[in-house]
Image: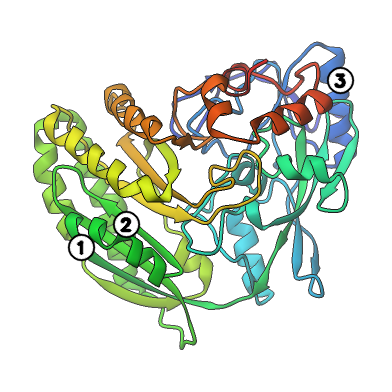
Amino acid sequence: MTETYVRTATSPWRNWAGTVTARPARIVSPASVDELAEALRRASEDGLRVKPVGTGHSFTATAATDGLLVRPDLLTGIREIDRKAMTVTVEAGTPLKRLNTALAREGLSLTNMGDIMEQTVAGATSTGTHGTGRDSASISAQIRALELVTADGTVLRCSETENADVFAVARIGLGALGVITAITFAVEPVFLLTAREEPMSFDQVTTEFDQLVAENEHFEFYWFPHTGNCNTKRNNRSAGPAAPLGRVGGWIEDELLSNGVFQVACALGRAVPATIPSIARISSRALSARTYTDIPYKVFTSPRRVRFVEMEYALPREAAVEALREVRAMVDRSPLRISFPVEVRTAPADDIALSTASGRESAYIAVHLYRGTPYQAYFTAVERIMTAHGGRPHWGKINTRDAAYLSGVYPRFGEFTAVRDRLDPDRLFGNDYLRRVLGD
């Protein structure tokens, strides 16, 4: 193991939101699968736990360790594009932004994606990152194969036809089964999406929610607490022509208003909470209706420069509107002052054991607060509503659930833990977070 990519930690590791801090004993940035396998063997011999980490966009301690922290900085790039199978195989540390731009140059695209591009492909899939879709599911559901280095240094190649039992659970593996080194995604010829964004009242969007989901390939909306106002977004495939956002108009909406002005508003609200309802009313009317057409990643994704903390739950889709109305009633009768909008998205059922949409059509309700704002009272009250509806928390976002609860809302929970027991019986990849959510 050369000194070029192994070093003793001299400062704490922190996640993007600043909610988790850890001080690993060693940090490794392997440049190959063989170097990673050697690092795992050394860590096991030295009695160190191991956790892979991406860009730290998870709000939970899923990647925290006081042992060996594995950074995928050198495991990046596209290994292969198979145009016959319509797949791309990419190294685990590749940021989604680099993957999306590289695919676009090749005339290809993922079918669906979330709205953040900074994550690594392994980090995003391991925690169940998703966008919104009537028919197309999360990024993990687009995986066709993956390469996994297990606790004893074995390199497993997993797909529906090779190590199928591991593939069934490892597409969302929480870093609990091993270290992913490469992922093969399904891709398709690049296409155009037309985005239609417009304000809508809370009452209208909740009354018409099922219709809006049924009529659009990708529908989502944001509700601004302390108001009856929402902003909706409908993305649908288009025959073109492309009509992207103008550089100036896009900058005003996405950078100046959604990031710059919003940052100032959030800081003011944190300092003077009494101003938040007034700010919310202004913010909810600041973004005007707009329509544009572009290639997928330029429509699905957007810059997120205002740092926040987040909790998100997946509910049976039929429960979403009732639960959201309960959240609104709770906020209205409480002294809480909520500066961030509440986000609602959907996903079809998929077949991944620990996917939040596993086996059921789902809707997601995500709540946020500006970083540094006390969030416990708000998140606790929302979580109480979500769990009453059988909600499943996003694996990378703040929650208080444990294995006893999660085993009850995931019918295939035992399937995952059985594979974990086989691949990592000594819990080389364990930490406190996994002990809570998966048990020991």
Tell me where residue 391 appears, x and y as whole percent: 44, 36
Residue 323: name its quadrant. top left
Q: Amino acid at mark 1?
A: Met
Neighbours of disc 1 within 10 Å: few (<14), some (14-19), many (20+): some
Q: Of marks 2 and 1, which one's residue comes earlier in the chain?
A: 1
The span from disc 2 to disc 3 (Cα, nearest Å) is: 48 Å
Q: Which residue is mark 2?
A: 221
Q: Which residue is mark 3?
A: 42
Q: Is residue 269 visible?
A: no
Neighbours of disc 2 within 10 Å: few (<14), some (14-19), many (20+): many
The span from disc 3 to disc 1 (Cα, nearest Å) is: 57 Å
Q: Amino acid at mark 2?
A: Phe
**Helix, strand or loop at disc 3?**
helix
The disc label shown at residue 200, or none: 1
Task: Name the foreground residue: 133 vs 123.
Answer: 133
User: Relative to residue 379, is residue 301 drawn left or right?
Assistant: right
Tell me where residue 324 appears, x and y as whole percent: 28, 44
CB atoms of marks 2 and 3 within 8 Å = no
